[in-house]
Image (tube, grey):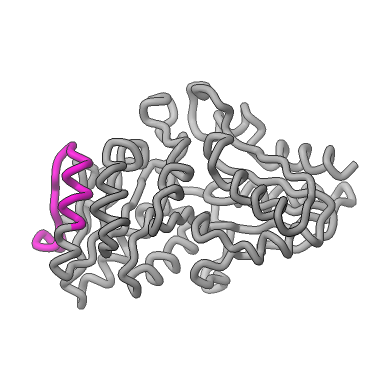
Amino acid sequence: MSKIANKQMICEVLMDAAKTDKSIVALCSDSRGSGSFTPFADTYPEQFVETGIAEQNLVSISAGLAKCGKKSYAVSPACFLSTRSYEQAKVDVAYSNTNVKLIGISGGVSYGALGMSHHSAQDIAAMAAIPNMRVYIPSDHLQTKELVKALLKDEKPAYIRVGRNAVDPVYEEGKVPFEMDKATVVCEGTDVAIIACGEMVKPAKDAAEILKTQGISATVVDMYCVKPLDKAAVVKAAENAKAVITVEEHAPFGGLGSMVSQVVGAECPRKVINMSLPDEPVITGTSKEVFDYYGLNAEGIAKKAAELVK
């Protein structure tokens, strides 16, 4: 199956919708190329705004256009969108309840060798802490397509984080189980529950296959809706397992692991292990090299699960 970057799918969905919906506006902070939005800018120049490298202006302009009835999609590197324009996201978008979708591209460590200045390992915690701000991290381009189509139908603020590169699909074309704000159960098991988001879902799914050969049954949950967190899915997965593992491309604090731990601790106490990036500047390398180094791959997840169960 072909691999398509999630950011490219976002552009394709919006371009298709913009054929008939002239209220859709895409905005970029000198990021139309890296965000795969050049086709949108070329096809719909009157529905495109380039702010230059000015993320605060990007978000405020998006909010202003939304107040005028536009559907604003602000595209910018996640590392800058979630930090430089944090106050604007909090006040102009969330507090003002504007129809702005913040698209954080090249999220996590997908800028690779550019290092910590270009990594976004804090954005889940930061954005999820803002009242009225939803946080979504789709796992592949097929799920991304369904998510953006759903977001086009509402007028609430949201932050969507996607990676830079094309990733192996988790789902099959035409067979994407998607329900807005409901986690997707990729597979069901009885020994360990693995709850992952974004690019960590595919290695979690592959880890379940490895565990099966070892006689270990694993549930894998795709928690693309980090906020609002699907608490019911977390409880069900935890109740049917001996232990829970969360996997995320994020710092160890305030992200998916912290949220899942809160739910499990309150509703159905189980041991919860959080697999994440470390609380330090990560090594320099490609996404795969970084993931492999820290065990955020199928083999690393399977090893951790086996240790927990045995």
Would residue 60 be counted in the magenta stretch?
yes
Is 41 placed above or below 33 here?
Answer: below
Nearer-the-camera pick, 306 or 89: 89
The residue lying at 75 percent from left, 52 percent from top is 208
**Prevailing SS of the magenta stretch:** helix
Point out residue 36 in the picture as x, y percentages from the top left corner: 29, 50
166 to the left or right of 274: left
In the rendered image, the residue lying farthest to the left is 46
Q: Quadrant of residue 222?
A: bottom right
Q: Is residue 46 above or below residue 306?
A: below
> With respect to residue 117, does 40 lie above or below?
below
Give the residue displayed 85% in from the left and 50% down from the top.
213
Count the numbered circles shown: 0
Q: Position of residue 239 (x, y in %)?
A: 79, 61
Q: Residue at x 69, y 56 (%)?
A: 220
Q: Is residue 90 left or right of residue 161?
A: left
- Quadrant in which the C terminus is drawn: top right
Q: Is any part of residue 254 visible from this angle?
A: yes
**In the rendered image of this protein, does residue 44 appear above or below residue 177?**
above
Q: Position of residue 206 (x, y in %)?
A: 69, 50
Q: Which residues are magenta?
A: 42-63
| Figure quadrant of residue 15 | bottom left
- Residue 116 forms part of the magenta stretch: no
The location of residue 186, given as percent across then percent down, is 66, 62
